[in-house]
Amino acid sequence: MFGIGMPELIVILVIALIVIGPQKLPDLARSLGKGLAEFKRATDDFKQSVEDEARTQDEKERIAREVAAREAATTAPTEGEKKEPAKV
C-alpha cells in the first residue's frame, strides 16, 4: 500500500495516537473514511459523465455519417443519368 509496510504503518498510527489523542482518533478516522468515500463517489460520477459524453459524441458522428451516406446515395447519378465528359 503506497510502499508503506506494516512497521511504518504502526509507527504512523502510534504518532497519530500521541498527537491527536485517543478520544479524537476515532472521529478523525471516521471523517477520513467519509472524505475518501465522497472522493471515490465524485470520481466515479466524473468518469461516468465523461463516458456518457464520449458515447453521445460517437452516436452523433455515426448519425452524421449515415445521413451523409444516404444523401450521397440519393444524389449520385444512376447508370442512365451519367453525363458524357465535356468536350474541349
Image: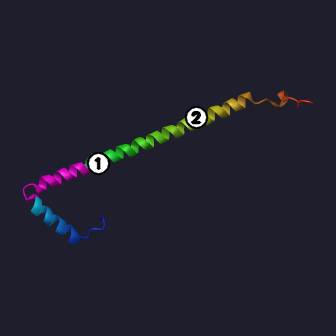
Where's residue 71, x and y in %?
A: 68, 29
List the single residue furthest toward the front: 19
**Mark 2 Cα-neighbour bin, 10 Å: few <14, some 14–19, many ≥20:** few
Is residue 16 left or right of 41 when viewed as pictured?
left
Please name the residue shown 30% across and 68% down the image: 3
Q: Which residues are magenta?
A: 20-36
Mark 2 belongs to which amino acid?
Ile
Q: Position of residue 46 (x, y in %)?
A: 37, 44
| Residue 25: in magenta span | yes
Q: Secondary structure at mark 2?
A: helix
Q: How many marks?
A: 2
Q: Quadrant of the C terminus?
A: top right
Q: Horizontal placement of 9 versus 62: left or right? A: left
Q: Is residue 85 magenta?
A: no
Mark 1 — residue? 39
The residue furthest bottom is 7
Q: Residue at x 30, y 46 (%)?
A: 41
Position of residue 40 measured from the top left corner of the image (x, y, whole percent): 30, 49
Residue appearing at x 22%, y 70% in the figure: 8
Q: Amino acid at mark 1?
A: Phe
Q: Quadrant of the N terminus?
A: bottom left
Q: Is residue 48 left or right of residue 83?
A: left
Q: Earlier in the sequence, mark 1 or mark 2?
A: 1
Residue on which disc 2 sits: 63
Q: Chief secondary structure of the magenta span?
A: helix
